[in-house]
Amino acid sequence: MHGQHGAKLVAMDVVREGFTATSPRIRYWQAGTGGPRVLLIMGFGMQGEIWRPQVDDLSRDHQVAFFDNRGIGESETDKRLWTMADMARDAVRVAEQLGWDDFHLAGVSMGGMVAQELACNHPERVKSLTLIATHEGGANLQWLPSVRALNVFLRANSGPREQRLDALRELLYPSAFLASVDPEAMQQRMSAQLGKPAPKSTILGQLHAILRHSTGPRLAAFRAPTLIIKPGQDILIPPRNSDRLRRRLAHARLLEIEDAGHGAVFQSAPAINRALREHIGAAEPRRATDEKRELR
């Protein structure tokens, strides 16, 4: 398995990889051969391999699929502007290519928005839902970050590589965390996250989808087990957005990781991996029981 940058994923046990049969052709990978099926959706401008801390852990006893969103990494782009529904269809096409009728679904940031859309449009496919550092959108724009965070976001997506690295570091991780980690290891991680800059058309396509994103009332009808993970120090998607999602999804469980920033899947990988394992494990037998109950 290879990416477009220095951080190789050879340590991951990739058992299947390829492209979806229909356009735009989406590049996907599967790690792990047994256990529950888990589909992971990555956020804005990032390649699917950024899920590595979760894939390495879960693939020991789960089947884990991840992919590059359209216009990212090795996936084809779309010349027109697109929506979350388009990206949700891409995710479904990946699942269909793998022969997965249903799966446990997790998304981070923009990937969490795609996951919400998929759950609204195909609830029968989603055995459980995990939403990390994300929001429900809506015309009231309450989900918008501070002006400072927007400035950092813009710097992370334009200009020289060093500037983008510095901005991405500030955007994803609290200063206390950055002070506590090995700078060299962090630099490698940041280079991996930065990867090859996404084309301008992809940035515009994803921003268009985010600005039009709104699942609120539709999401309230979703009934499968749901976990909302709230990074307490997130400057890009303010933590209040997780609280709004929790109010919308009355049955959901909210897990706050108080010291985590927007890059929680790396910063707080052990806590997130534990939470995913517990959530998926609890949803598996419950789903079977629910189906038996419906058959009676």
Image: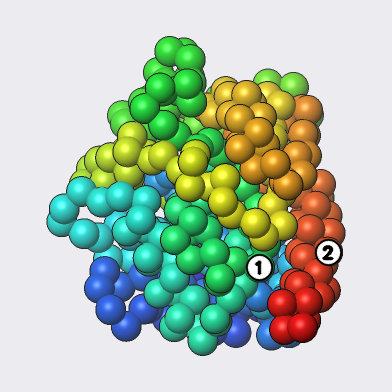
**Which quarter of the image is occupied by the C terminus?**
bottom right
Q: Is residue 100 left or right of residue 292?
A: left
Cα distance between the residues tagged 1 and 2: 11 Å
Please tell me which residue lies in front, 190 or 218: 218
The residue at the far top in this view is: 147
Q: How many marks?
A: 2
Instruction: Label 2: state its secondary structure.
Output: helix
Taking depth in this image into account, of 36 and 178 the one nearest to the observer is: 36
Describe the element under mark 1 as helix, strand or loop: strand
Identify the residue at horizontal 20%, vertical 48% (top origin). 81
81 is higher (above) or lower (below) than 285: above
Q: Which residue is drawn at 45% across and 81% down?
A: 96
User: Which residue corresponds to mark 1?
Assistant: 127
Quadrant hosting residue 257: top right
Q: Is residue 74 visible?
A: no
Q: Mark 2 points at which residue?
A: 282
As shown in the figure, which amino acid type bears the numbered disc 1?
A: Lys
Label 2 crowd (10 A; few <14 / some 14-19 / many >=20): few
Residue 20 in view, yes or no? yes
Position of residue 98 in the picture relative to residue 36 (left or right)? left
As drawn, which residue projects farthest toward the front? 296
User: Residue 253: horizontal and vertical position, in percent?
Assistant: 77, 44
Which residue corresponds to the image point at 16% horizontal and 53% vertical from the top-left? 80
- Can you say whether 10 is above or below 243 in the image? below
Disc 2 marks a residue whose amino acid type is Ala
Q: Left or right: 51 with respect to 97?
A: right
Residue found 48% across the figure and 26% down from its top: 143
Q: Earlier in the sequence, mark 1 or mark 2?
A: 1
Residue 36 locus on image (x, y percent): 72, 76
Q: Position of residue 259 (x, y in %)?
A: 77, 27
